[in-house]
Amino acid sequence: MLAILLLAAAPALAQKPAGAPAAAAKSEPAPAQLADWTKLIDANKCEAARQLCNGYVNDPQIGQQVEAQKCLANVALCGHDVVTLQGTGNGGGLIAGGYTDDAVNESLAHLNAAMKLAPQDLSIHEGRLHVLEVAMRYQAMVKALDESCSIYKGPYVPDAWLAYGPELEEVGQYQTAVEFMQVLNRHYPNNSDILGNIGAFLSMEGKGSEAIPYLQQAVKLAPSDPINTWDLGRAYDYAGQVKLADEWYQTGLSLQTGKGQQAEEKCLYGQFVEQELHDRARGCALEKQGCAAKEQTACAPAAPSTAHAPGAKGSS
């Protein structure tokens, strides 16, 4: 079963008053509190959670109403998960979890109601984006992001929105990711991470020439960022601009401090040196620092030439 998205606030801990008598050994169980809905859903007691939370929809306290709507958004998905075949932006496909359309619509209705009550609750905005993403409603997800960026003015953004980039990459939704990042670029201009992500996703689509201006801006804003400088090299590589690709690959490598990432980049750069700069010796040295043995193509013996030696043609 798919994990249900939990949007509950942390429950407060009840404290025993000083001097209170010890509880009787056979006391009745305490009545359910609103915060208990997460436990009910975790136990797949969907109907019990629904009944509990319905009792707080019209509570005098707005906070309780908000929590009830978050609860009911999760209840709508509880027990309605399905397995789907999801197409990707690169022409492939993958098996993924999702929810029935009716369950998604009901969940979104509760999240929208919660958002009207508490527009500055970031978790509601994140929850809506998550539900749309899992439901593969990608265009609606982009539209919802635009709305959330206009409504939510609290902390943790744009970082909270940027977190969806890797998720879209994982399912191959590169075009959606570009549109998603373009929305962020309108609301948060001159952000090197956003610009770098636009360039990276354009490169993943094979649009190196379109990616270059975004990555150039990103590098100008954050010249010591190893990711954007490396990605600029990749974009130049995809665009067939070998000299500039070599320059920015080396810059990105020089800035990279993560050992694992540095090894991966040395492997890729070694293959570039081998294939585009035609320097097998240097390519081999780099590949040995980062590539698995089977990927060290520059280190393999050169294939024997099939061309005839001078004078080796058969006589007529």
Image: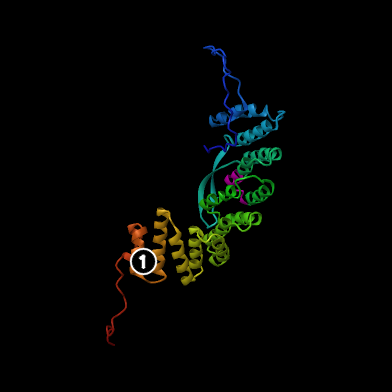
Quarter residue 54 falls in: top right
Relative to the observer, which residue lies in front, 308 or 265?
265
Residue 217 image point, x, y percent: 57, 63
Amino acid type at image mark 1: Gly
Residue 116 image point, x, y percent: 71, 40
Q: Say how many tags the image has.
A: 1
Q: Is residue 107 magenta?
A: no
Magenta-colored segment: predominant secondary structure: helix
Scheme of colours in the image? rainbow
Quarter residue 192 falls in: bottom right
Q: Is residue 63 visible?
A: yes
Left or right: 18 with respect to 261? right
Q: Mark 1 points at which residue?
A: 283
Residue 98 image point, x, y percent: 56, 43
Give above or below for 269 relative to 31: below
Relative to the observer, which residue lies in front, 76 or 14?
14
Residue found 56% across the figure and 12% down from its top: 21
Give above or below for 226 relative to 151: below
Quarter residue 4 falls in: top right
Range of the magenta residues? 129-138
Relative to the observer, which residue lies in front, 88 or 11?
11
**Is disc 1 placed on a helix, strand or loop?**
helix
Give above or below for 269 relative to 117: below
Q: Can residue 101 be seen in this view?
A: no
Residue found 40% across the figure and 53% down from its top: 260
Residue 6 image point, x, y percent: 57, 36
Relative to the observer, which residue lies in front, 201 or 105?
201
Quarter of the image that includes the C terminus: bottom left
